[in-house]
Image (spheres, coloured by chain):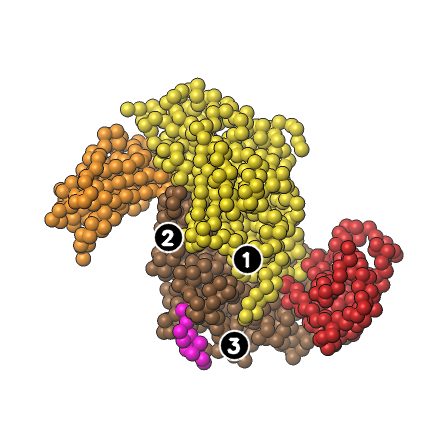
Chain colours: A red, B orange, C brown, D yellow
Amino acid sequence: MAGLEDLYREIILDHYRAPRNRGELPVPPAHQVEGYNPLCGDEIVLYLDIDDGVVRDVRTGGQGCSISQASTSMMSAAVKGLRIEEARQLIRTFKALMSIHESKLEGETDGEDGATLDGVRLGDLEALQGVVKFPVRIKCATLAWNTLEQGLDEAGQPQPA
Amino acid sequence: MAGLEDLYREIILDHYRAPRNRGELPVPPAHQVEGYNPLCGDEIVLYLDIDDGVVRDVRTGGQGCSISQASTSMMSAAVKGLRIEEARQLIRTFKALMSIHESKLEGETDGEDGATLDGVRLGDLEALQGVVKFPVRIKCATLAWNTLEQGLDEAGQPQPA
Amino acid sequence: MSAAPLDVARVQADFPILKRQVHGQRLVYLDSASSSQKPTAVLEAMDHLYRESYANVHRGVYAIAEEATAAYEGARARVASFLGVPSPSELVFTRNVTEAINLVAQSWGHANLHEGDVVVLTDLEHHANIVPWHILAAERGIELRWVPLTEDYRLDVSHLDALLDGAKLFAFSAASNVLGTLNDVALLADAAHAAGALALVDAAQFAPHRRLDVTEWGADFVGVTGHKMLGPTAIGALWARPELLDTMPPFLGGGEMIRDVSRDGFTPNEVPWKFEAGTMPIAEAVGLGAAVDYLEALGMDAVATHETDLTAYALRALEDRFGDRLAIYGPRTTERRGATISFLFEGIHAHDISQVVDEHGVCVRAGHHCAKPLMRVLGVPATTRASFYVYNDESDVDALVEALAAAERFFAI
Amino acid sequence: MSAAPLDVARVQADFPILKRQVHGQRLVYLDSASSSQKPTAVLEAMDHLYRESYANVHRGVYAIAEEATAAYEGARARVASFLGVPSPSELVFTRNVTEAINLVAQSWGHANLHEGDVVVLTDLEHHANIVPWHILAAERGIELRWVPLTEDYRLDVSHLDALLDGAKLFAFSAASNVLGTLNDVALLADAAHAAGALALVDAAQFAPHRRLDVTEWGADFVGVTGHKMLGPTAIGALWARPELLDTMPPFLGGGEMIRDVSRDGFTPNEVPWKFEAGTMPIAEAVGLGAAVDYLEALGMDAVATHETDLTAYALRALEDRFGDRLAIYGPRTTERRGATISFLFEGIHAHDISQVVDEHGVCVRAGHHCAKPLMRVLGVPATTRASFYVYNDESDVDALVEALAAAERFFAI
Ligand SMILES: Cc1ncc(COP(=O)(O)O)c(C=O)c1O
Ligand SMILES: Cc1ncc(COP(=O)(O)O)c(C=O)c1O
């Protein structure tokens, strides 16, 4: 039985209370992209400043629960400065983390090497892995990432082969 | 519990085996009308020779189960020669007979005065009252009568006030 | 009509799920507006059919087929009588109220609505009474208009006549699934008729809680959904005036809804079967029949009184404990109000509240409640919603208040 | 896959209704082609959901809502796997196969069929796979063509290519509900594709009886209906190629099928939810999940073998006892044939036969079996139909033969 502390780790509540990179960027040159979670009504807006294959800046807006807000905040911090391929790799890694089945996680020692997946360092993002134990909330955690992916696509950046 | 003999009275089987008034009439002057029982696929065709407010002649065609065939046969015999208002009255009476609930019938002595309803003599038709105990078959028994009613309507005869 | 007050303890004993624990806590089910729990009588009615008299209906002449048909049509008669429907033949079974409204949109709508025609909705509709009209609007170019809300979360009828001017249909809910507001259906239906429009009532949130009489309402279409009124999933009903049902074209095509089929075409069956294509929710209809029997045995007046008392208690308890920190989206008194209470804590998302109170065994909904246009009007992305029904009592309200207090502490900044 | 033969006595013990008596006789249920009976496991799965974990799905974050959602989506995964569907997201739950076909007709059909387009059907279709196309034909002016039958009650494929020439869709059943004929689905689907048409398969009478693998068939749409395959009423399923589902417009509008709704319009949800408007048949999906588990435990190969043996026995018994007096409408051997046998006695109406055998506890269907165009081809208004399933055995065939003999005597002229 998963407890609330699995879901609401301290670092998540911290990102929720003090979200990083809130704000807007002028469009254009930035790309603006919106995401919805039809379940709970969460909305997120991303402004992506992409230049020369690099995510130079990210700003976020919208409203949502602590999980979606924290995930958005963490995502914005994690992808800023990444090359597009790196950002896409991180999206894949994060989504893979979110699709790991509860039973696998249960057997894990607490985050000892859970911090890498496919060799990608997750850092703070690792704190979100407890969400997997609350299936309904997974969409809250992935909203920012799906929106980012859509933004990268829309920004017309070539997809990796 | 109703038994088969309630449904298949001898006189019904007789009408079924030797249906009265089978055949066709030239259209026009006769009116032709068709009826279907969507449940069992029974089809009936009536030819009505109506003149001066009187059902001068009736012929019947189509295919169906013993109940629908017997009811058609009995109907044709019963309405031939009736004035239209009388025929309509008979339709109403017959349908009323068919909508009497089983429990009422159970209490009845066997046909002693069951042969009249609203003061209309039913004669042979009375034999069909056992059908009420087999709700699914009621539509077999009423098919001919509904078709007759439709025929009288279509023939443009004035409906009684 | 029973004048006896509701014996909630006895009612609770009829609902097996209430014996359940979650997270080691007593289950406090406060999400009946989403779907109600089911009494043993409903479960047993369906089980009995399957174990004793199950067969497809309208099709067989053998004994169990007759029994199943009698059970199915008997259920139609009981539901019809519960809703004040004059004749069972005016009641069409559907999967849910969503399908009932889609049936009207596609059958009546396709036959009667053309480019430029106006359908009037309200700002408090559930998506079930919005999206079917959007689909039609996109296909046909009809215009949608929206009756706004007042400050106290009621329909603002001050410009109703202007909004209804030239309208063909006014489609509105009898009770809001978010605000708890009960609308004055007869008044709205009258206004529709005065403007020459038909009135469609989404009674999903009304039928479970108040005595409903379609003829008193004077509307033209009324839809209800079984799973919110103690019935099983997969059964709902549409009542419509018989003249309308008679002339409406079929909705779905298939077995049962036809009189004849040839290679060249088909002739539809009589109502209500014209609208019941394929094998219907037989056991579910029987379950809904048992549900309305159960409600009638409780007495809808007793149900209404119980819910009103509980709502008053809950409104007071929330205000006493949380004051201004908790905003209630809906009328603050029990006047023309059902037992559905939407609220938000300043700075805490509805979703998070719901998650924390679940830890205390308390089930409340968080989200847009399938009413996104209303959420936009309210200016919030989501609310937390507690809704009460026949099996809830004051101890459930107390449990909610304690769990909310714990949630507030948990997210305290 | 179980290679063990079916232990019919054990199977019978799982079906509570078989303990029932009618007219003082043992119930001999031979109408499974109309609807099957339900094993205890199916009834208990639904009961368990309602008693332990019931809530509306996809909507709540609380524990029992999560459990209900997991049960509903888990059922989708199990049914998908039973049908060889690659991913659960390709499987849409519907009320029944009738709704599945109407969904295709209205969603795919409205988007893809225009005046003069051709849809090819066959002469052995059920109304469910005829009337939706008639409705579309009347609305859109599409042309319907019909694949005829051979003398031995199979599809005559000799002119198939000509019939399919220029067609957009070939819609046919995998198994006839009247004749018992099993069609060569892969061959028909290939022919459709060769002509540039899509293939829709009505698998209502196939899925309960034979292992079905949608990818092996290579069709584009496949519909099944739960109540004929040991599941409850009110649940069916439509599989379609994901590319099709993705591009098809929504069918019914309401909650759950949307991603966003505003006053101006809506954005549909992902598949399969795009096609699941309103509260779905939650308990019924769970029941169908339990039904396919039950069938898988029996082993579909064992089911097929059992049915083939029983059909051979029945065909022989009918012929031995009644000879030419009894006409069988369908293949005379078990090759490419299911366990559904339609027949008529010379001079005795199907309805009357059914009534008399009921007196002996034997349930058979009489009528047009929702296949009136086929009845016209056969030149009869109705047939009597006996259909066998997992819980039937040779003693049931014997009871049928005795009851038929009694009926023949009763109506002897
Ligand atoms: C071949 C076939 N298709 C379609 C149907 C319709 O099934 P349902 O009524 O469950 O939609 C049936 C059964 O009646 C059938 O046998
Ligand atoms: C007001 C209202 N209308 C319609 C619906 C849709 O009900 P269903 O999902 O049973 O069709 C609901 C419930 O979700 C509702 O509250």
C-alpha distance separating marks 1 and 3: 30 Å
Asked if disc 3 is less than 8 Å from ligand 2, the answer is no
**Residue nearest the viewer, comparing A157 with D333:** A157
Q: Secondary structure at mark 2?
A: loop
Left or right relative to C334: residue A156 = right
From the viewer's perspective, is the residue at label 1 or at label 3 nearer? 1
Which quarter of the image is occupied by the C terminus of chain C?
bottom right
From the viewer's perspective, is the residue at label 1 or at label 2 nearer? 1
Q: Is residue B112 visible?
A: no
Q: Residue at x 75, y 61 (%)?
A: A158
Q: In the rendered structure, which amino acid carries the disc numbered 3?
A: Leu
| Residue C57, image quadrant | top left
Pinpoint the chain carrying mark 1. Answer: D
Q: Which residue is mark 1?
A: D250
C-alpha distance separating marks 2 and 3: 37 Å
Q: Which residue is mark 2?
A: C271
The residue range painted magenta reads: C158-168
Q: Secondary structure at mark 1?
A: loop
Q: In the rendered structure, which amino acid carries the disc numbered 1?
A: Pro
C-alpha distance separating marks 1 and 2: 27 Å
Which quarter of the image is occupied by the N terminus of chain C?
bottom left
Residue C149 tag number:
3
In the rendered view, would you say B60 is above or below C386? Answer: above
Pinpoint the chain carrying mark 3. Answer: C
**Residue nearest the viewer, comparing C110 with C60:** C110
Give the main secondary structure, helix, strand or loop, of the magenta stretch.
helix
Q: In the rendered structure, which amino acid carries the disc numbered 2?
A: Val
